[in-house]
Image (cartoon, rainbow, N blue to C red):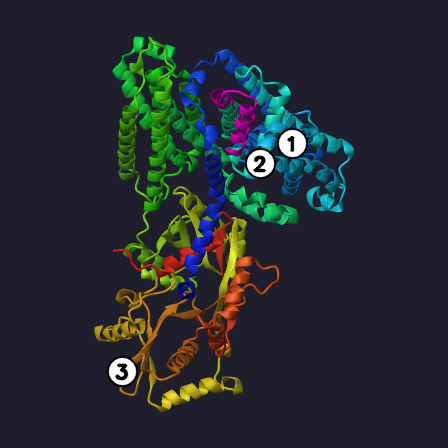
């Protein structure tokens, strides 16, 4: 991997890949940027809203009204399952009606809230139906089919707006760009009807099922229309509760235009674009902005958030405990199932993300619990409940409960990450905090709704306790800093909400109201700062007293002695001698019959070469190591895997990247005779004529020799740092474990040396450190290699390893992956930086056979980032167990 580091330094490859990685993050941050832009553009409308009055209206909604609105919202969401019943019928899915409804609910509510152009719903449906053993090709066809029909219903509603059934003229005249958006949406329906009659639709979207018959097409448009129509009816019903003069057609017109604006904004759930447009439409009808805000808040909560939380609860029990290996192995099947149309949209990009949706759902429920506690603490309680709570308790207890609610809310938000990663310790703490939070939220303002929700989440967590098995997860300084920043921003949000809403709310209190129940802005500042500091202190203590993390200290002398004994009855490979450097840790699998050497870089355990031991046990050993690493939320990667072992990696869910080819000289056929080897004979004859001679120094090596070798090594390094991991470094105890090849000048001084690395198979031998003085004649290393090859042949060895030619024969096939094609370009044109072609030509003079070497990595790992991490691993300062 030295060659990768050299290129990375000269081409600033690491910097480039880092920029590309951040560009990927930009795609995630884009929706939030759009939301910020919408808010910036809509400040005029938002500033007209008095949030104190808005909160006052929300607090005075009758419970029966809430139940009515929520019931209709849930009905409207359930209508969306018509999509799933449609694909169940059209693609002949073998799922029951309740399963179909449940899958639809989970996928649709998550897609409503998260969105991302339908990727969320598509990914969730893939996992849900895959869990029922439905062929991946059928699932791929179904989600492609759904992606084309989803907007047909909104397109139909746009036509109703254009012809005047839904009044939209006032909104389009106020903002002229909206009419173009409405027309573009309206034209989608005729475009869909024309498209489905083409061979393109039949082949790529309908999976060679032919054209849609009119019954299926009508049902598709009908299902989509029901979704958007019932959502609009929900908007109207909530609006009519607070805006009695809001007519049905006006509400549907506003909803249609707002939904189109939300889609154009590309933000999750259309947040920002939908809300601003809806408020604009309602205000154009003359309704007060504060009541318009009430309608939007309730619509978001009742139609989006509550159904999504219910969907999370459903999803929490929908998946087996460990789908990790199956998901990785399915990745190749899914890639093969993708057609061209789907590859453009790349909907399975979320596949890995939703793979452990059960634990992920629980994590998000815990995160929501923390947010709900903070929002509950930031907003004033209902006056009659505050009066009732003070009669039962006292104002100091209410204040303490308020402060504890804030602290618990912050802690739950941070611990939600541990729940998603299925950490056992996070489970126990979260369960305790949820129960405590339900008590304190009752004690501060008798908010029984929040308390019930927290207890439901606690119950779901307890029922799912078998999911939590991980001992620990990697937590670096950047992770800690990231979570510190997240908690800081969330607490700042709490402060903004509390300090702005409370003063506005106080202006609308009845004259006899007890104002001491409510916090002033300065008190909110104290609560926020104190809560943040206490939460950080508790989290710091949890971190300090956490279970001992995975120890990666390298192999102890006892473990190296065990390795030596192991190699007496088991074969090694060309990389086995590197295990005696002491910087690799050992995992003994299958009752100590298999050895897997590894080192850790970030969240990955990188195995050097193939596992050692009987081949019949290799697959089981890999699975044991995967389970071991999974306890610490780490991924397993195999570096320099050989072709014979690829089937073992493949059946355990790995993908491959060709690193290059290793030059192996078959010593039986090696000779200096013949025209082809004339240049090698010339080199040997010249050095022998000039008085240079070759010898093998057997261990133990004397101190004087090691001092000379250290002098040569330091001059050769010329101030550069030593490499490690897959390369040996100059360290006396390591050199004492094997012979060293020496080339001496006529004065008997050593001018070049190479440490020999046995293959531990009785037939192979290699070299590790190869270093020489700068003043040596040209061809010095050629002479050293020639003498080594002749010596190894005389000793009865069958193969001599000259080392790897990086990127050799990589990416030659037309169907090679894009990363290997890029590597091919580097191989062909990277001579001025590294000399790939020249290195291969140099080794070719010894007539070797070329054997490929691979990088085996899980499907969930980003290959470019992995290569950067490998560069860092090899460039890391070598160290060994003390």
Determine the CA span between mark 2 and mark 1.
11 Å
- Can you say whether 537 is above or below 295 in the image? below
**How far across and how far down the image is residue 640, in percent?**
46, 60
Predominant SS along the magenta part: helix
| Residue placed most toward the observer, 860 or 258 | 258
Residue 760 part of the magenta-drawn span:
no
Q: Which residue is mark 3?
A: 749
Q: Earlier in the sequence, mark 2 or mark 1?
A: 1
* The N terminus: image quadrant: bottom left
Question: Dot 3 surroundings within 10 Å: few (below 14), some, or many (20 or more)?
Answer: few
- Can you say whether 639 is above or below 433 in the image? below
Query: Can residue 730 be seen from the camera position used here?
Result: yes
Q: Which mark is residue 154?
A: 1
Determine the CA span between mark 3 and mark 1.
86 Å
Query: Can residue 97 be seen from the camera position used here?
Result: no
Q: Which mark is residue 263?
A: 2
């Amino acid at each position: 991997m030295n060659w990768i580091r050299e290129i990375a330094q000269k081409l600033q490859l690491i910097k480039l890949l880092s920029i590309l990685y951040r560009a990927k993050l930009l795609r995630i941050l884009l929706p939030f940027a759009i939301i910020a832009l919408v808010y910036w553009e809509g400040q005029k409308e938002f500033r007209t809203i008095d949030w104190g009055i808005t909160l006052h209206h929300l607090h005075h909604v009758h419970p029966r009204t809430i139940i009515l609105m929520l019931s209709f919202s849930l009905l409207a969401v359930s209508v969306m399952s018509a999509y799933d019943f449609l694909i169940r019928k059209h693609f002949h899915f073998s799922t029951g009606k309740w399963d179909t409804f449940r899958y639809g609910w989970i996928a649709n509510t998550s897609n409503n809230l998260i969105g991302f152009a339908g990727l969320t719903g598509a990914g969730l449906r893939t996992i849900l139906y895959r869990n029922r053993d439905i062929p991946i090709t059928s699932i791929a066809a179904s989600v492609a089919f759904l992606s084309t029909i989803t907007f047909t219903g909104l397109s139909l509603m746009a036509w109703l707006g254009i012809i005047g059934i839904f009044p939209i003229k006032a909104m389009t005249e106020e903002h002229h760009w909206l009419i173009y958006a409405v027309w573009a949406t309206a034209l989608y329906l005729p475009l869909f009807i024309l498209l489905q009659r083409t061979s393109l639709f039949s082949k790529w979207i309908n999976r060679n099922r032919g054209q849609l018959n009119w019954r299926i097409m009508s049902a598709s448009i009908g299902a989509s229309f029901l979704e958007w129509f019932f959502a609009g009816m929900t908007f109207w019903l909530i609006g009519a509760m607070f805006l009695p003069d809001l007519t049905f057609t006006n509400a549907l017109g506003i909803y249609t235009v707002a939904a189109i604006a939300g889609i154009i904004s590309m933000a999750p759930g259309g947040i920002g674009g939908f809300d601003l447009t809806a408020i604009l439409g309602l205000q154009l009808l003359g309704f007060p902005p504060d009541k318009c805000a009430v309608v939007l808040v309730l619509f978001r909560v009742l139609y989006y958030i509550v159904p999504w939380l219910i969907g999370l609860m459903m999803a929490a029990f929908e998946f087996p405990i460990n789908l990790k290996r199956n998901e990785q192995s399915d990745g190749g099947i899914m890639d093969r199932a993708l057609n061209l149309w789907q590859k453009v949209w790349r909907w399975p990009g979320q596949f890995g993300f939703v793979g452990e949706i059960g634990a992920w759902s629980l994590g998000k429920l815990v995160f929501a619990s923390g947010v709900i506690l903070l929002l509950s603490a930031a907003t004033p309680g209902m006056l009659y409940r505050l009066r009732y709570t003070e009669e039962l308790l006292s104002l100091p207890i209410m204040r303490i409960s308020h402060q504890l609610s804030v602290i618990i809310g912050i802690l739950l938000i941070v611990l939600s990450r541990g729940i998603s990663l299925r950490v056992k310790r996070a489970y126990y703490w979260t369960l305790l905090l949820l129960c405590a939070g339900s008590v304190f939220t009752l004690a501060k303002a008798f908010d029984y709704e929040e308390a019930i929700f927290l207890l439901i989440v606690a119950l779901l967590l307890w029922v799912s306790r078998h999911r939590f098995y991980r001992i620990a997860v990697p937590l670096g300084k950047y992770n800690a800093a990231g979570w510190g920043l997240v908690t800081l921003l969330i607490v700042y949000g709490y402060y903004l909400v509390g300090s702005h809403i409370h003063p506005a709310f106080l202006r609308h209190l009845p004259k006899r109201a007890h104002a001491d129940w409510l916090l002033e802005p300065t008190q909110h500042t104290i609560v926020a700062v104190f809560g943040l500091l206490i939460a950080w202190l508790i989290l710091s203590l949890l971190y300090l007293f956490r279970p001992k993390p995975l120890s990666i200290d390298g192999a102890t002398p006892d473990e190296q002695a065990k390795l030596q004994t192991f190699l007496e009855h088991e074969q090694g490979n060309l990389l086995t001698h590197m295990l005696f450097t002491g910087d690799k840790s050992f995992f003994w699998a299958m009752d100590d019959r298999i050895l897997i050497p590894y080192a850790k870089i970030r969240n990955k355990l990188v195995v050097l070469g193939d596992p050692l031991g009987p081949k019949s046990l290799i697959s089981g050993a890999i699975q044991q190591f995967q389970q071991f690493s999974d306890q610490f939320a780490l991924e397993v990667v195999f570096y320099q895997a050989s072709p014979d072992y690829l089937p073992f990696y493949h059946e355990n869910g790995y993908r491959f990247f060709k690193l290059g080819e290793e030059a192996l000289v078959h010593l039986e056929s090696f000779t200096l005779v013949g025209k082809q080897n004339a240049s090698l004979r010339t080199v040997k004859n010249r050095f022998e004529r000039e008085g240079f001679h070759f010898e093998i120094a057997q261990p133990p090596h004397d101190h004087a020799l090691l001092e000379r070798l250290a002098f040569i090594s330091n001059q050769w390094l010329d101030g550069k740092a030593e490499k490690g991991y897959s390369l040996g470094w100059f360290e006396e105890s390591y050199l004492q474990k094997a012979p060293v090849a020496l080339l001496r000048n006529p004065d008997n001084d050593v001018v070049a040396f190479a440490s020999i690395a046995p293959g531990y198979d009785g037939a192979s031998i290699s070299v590790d450190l190869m270093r020489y003085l700068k003043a040596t004649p040209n061809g010095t290393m050629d002479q050293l290699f020639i003498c080594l090859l002749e010596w190894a042949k005389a000793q009865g060895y069958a193969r001599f390893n000259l080392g790897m030619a990086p990127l050799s024969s990589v990416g030659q096939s037309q169907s090679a992956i894009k990363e290997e094609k890029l590597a091919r370009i580097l191989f062909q044109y990277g001579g001025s930086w590294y000399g790939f072609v020249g290195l291969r030509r140099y080794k070719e003079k010894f007539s070797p056979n070329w054997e490929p070497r691979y990088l085996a990595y899980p499907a969930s790992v980003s290959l470019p980032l992995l290569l950067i991490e490998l560069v860092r691993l090899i460039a890391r300062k070598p160290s060994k167990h003390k």
